[in-house]
Image: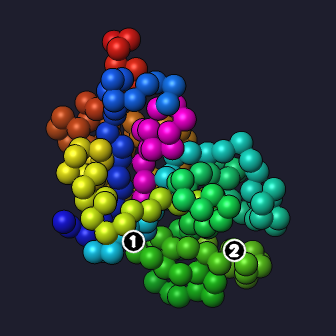
Amino acid sequence: MEELTGRLLVAAPRASEEQPVDDVEDDVFDRSVVLVLHHDDEGAHGLVLNRPLSAEVDAVLPGWQQHVATPQCLFQGGPVSLDSALGLVSVPGDDTSLGIKRLFGAVGLVDLDAPPVVVMPEVAALRIFAGYTGWSGGQLEGEIRRGSWFVVDAEARDAFTDDPRDLWGDVLRRQAGTLRLVASFPVDPSLN
């Protein structure tokens, strides 16, 4: 399988007989867009980009609220370790910055234990996530083979969009061919 680091996983729509609509609405992966932060033979992990929560960032990380991108709230990054927080940042240029670990391109993780005044001058955008997604070796590849995920290229704006709830459809609509049509797939196909 190809290297997936830095790419997007877009959840394939589920047929109503696969999972009842009420269950799908509570599923963090339903119509999710995941940015893969790391992928190798031992597994993968990433962040769900389109699950904003009603909680403010200052409720869990005082001092960071004023620095996060719009919408200024906490995001659910996945079902794993919901009691932990990750700060995803966009860092222009090629320089290394104190308190920031660059992952790929302009995307990195910020040390949330560092004072914001130290790291924020180097940051173009910041989003805080509770939890992350994770797969053991071969697990994600199996889900992709079964058709659970579409793998597409990420664009710089995806991780920090002002309209995260529309990201699933936006990403699919910019794809070529039949994948573009998936964006119009109804939430409950039985009502179609």
Label 2 Cα crowd, 10 Å radius (few <14 / some 14-19 / many 20+): some
Q: Position of residue 127 (x, y in %)?
A: 61, 60
Q: Residues within 10 Å of mark 1 (few under 14, many from 20)?
A: some
Q: Report which residue position mark 1 lands on.
A: 38
What's the residue type where badge 2 is placed? Leu
Residue appearing at x 24%, y 55% in the figure: 142
Residue matched to label 2: 112
- What residue span does the magenta drawing correspond to? 24-35
Check the picture and name the quadrant holding the C terminus. Answer: top left
Q: Residue 98: image x %, image y %?
A: 63, 88
Please tell me how many numbered marks the rendered image carries: 2
Tell me which numbered mark, 2 or 1, is placed earlier along the sequence: 1
**Is residue 115 inside the magenta stretch?**
no
Q: Which secondary structure lies at badge 2? A: loop
User: Relative to 39, does residue 162 appear above or below in the rendering?
Assistant: above
Q: Is residue 17 visible?
A: yes
Q: Amino acid at mark 1?
A: His
Q: Residue at x 33, y 23 (%)?
A: 17
Question: Element under label 1?
Answer: strand
Residue 27 magenta-drawn? yes
